[in-house]
Image (spheres, grey):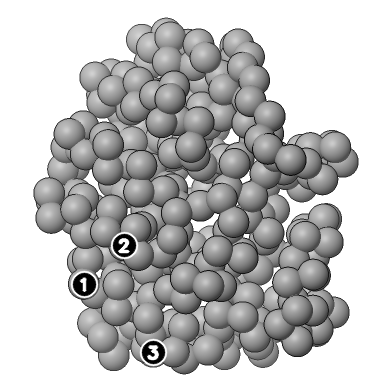
Amino acid sequence: MGIRYSHAACRRALFKSGLPGLDYSLNPYFGCEHGCLYCYSPSVFGNEWVARNWGKFSIAKLNIDRVLEGELRSGRRGIVGVGTVTDPYQPYEAKLELTRRCVEVLLRGGAHASIQTKSDLVLRDLDLAIPGLLDLGVTITTMDCWLAKRLEPGAPGPDARAKALQEFSDKGIETWVFFGPVIPTLNDGEDDIRAIAKIAKLTGSEVLYDKLNVKPFVLDRLAPLLYDLGADPGRIEALSERSKPYREALFKRIDSICGELGVRARPAF
């Protein structure tokens, strides 16, 4: 079954954000084509159909750039997280260029665009990147291409994402790696962490890391892969959600490896 594409009009573009370092959030799309198994975004909407079909539809907010212009004129300024719920550079964006138009509006209107993506499509908009007015975060859960393809079936591979980080960094743009979620037994080993830290060092990026959030339906999507790899979903849920000693040891290990390589690292939340 392919992706179902549709569009809608929105009444608001900017929403107050509770995420660290962000004043507002902006999401040009509802739904995401990347279909990441661990994504907990659909769980926040309280709609079972949305949660079970996440990764199978993408709804474009076709008027969002015009709405955004009006909101900026009314005085909303600050740091705007672009893509806090759905990836702003999912494949639909290649056709519609909604995110590009929104970033242009943000920069023209005096706001700071903080972009987070899993896609090297962001390189298309490298010409918009202005140091001090835009930063780029790229999610890399693993440098293992085989595992990445199974965890994030619709997203570009980690090598392509690392290239995007490098090109933005070379242009003087602040870059960061979002290493998350860190899933027990899948990508929490020393080699896994060291591979992420090396990419961050090569690209001059900071590492922001986060544990797996086992929201409703997350384990339903992850379980088949976990069984195939010989992992126990119940144990992973217990470790990620309820084991404080595991989390403390994990975060200490990430900090230690990053520190050894001279890479700045901190928890994302």
Which amino acid type corresponds to the residue marked 2 in the rendered image? Ala
Which amino acid type corresponds to the residue marked 1 in the rendered image? Leu
Which element type, helix, strand or loop, lies under badge 3? helix
Q: Is residue 20 left or right of residue 150?
A: left
Q: Which of the labelled discs sits on residue 256, or is there none? A: 3
4, 122: nearer the viewer: 4
Q: Quadrant of the N terminus?
A: top right
| Residue plotted at (12% across, 49% down) | 171
Q: Which residue is mark 2?
A: 162
- Observer able to see residue 185: yes
Give residue 66's position: percent from left, percent from top. Answer: 43, 9
Labels 2 and 3 touching (C-beta < 8 A): no
Which amino acid type corresponds to the residue marked 3 in the rendered image? Ser
Q: Residues within 10 Å of mark 3 (few under 14, many from 20)?
A: some
| First of labels 1, 2 by sequence position | 2
Q: Quadrant of residue 103?
A: top left
| First of labels 3, 1 by sequence position | 1
Q: Marks 2 and 3, Cα distance to the nearest angstrom?
A: 22 Å
15, 101: nearer the viewer: 101
Q: Quadrant of residue 98?
A: top left
Which element type, helix, strand or loop, lies under badge 1? helix
Labels 3 and 1 touching (C-beta < 8 A): no
Q: Which residue is mark 1?
A: 202
Labels 1 and 2 touching (C-beta < 8 A): yes
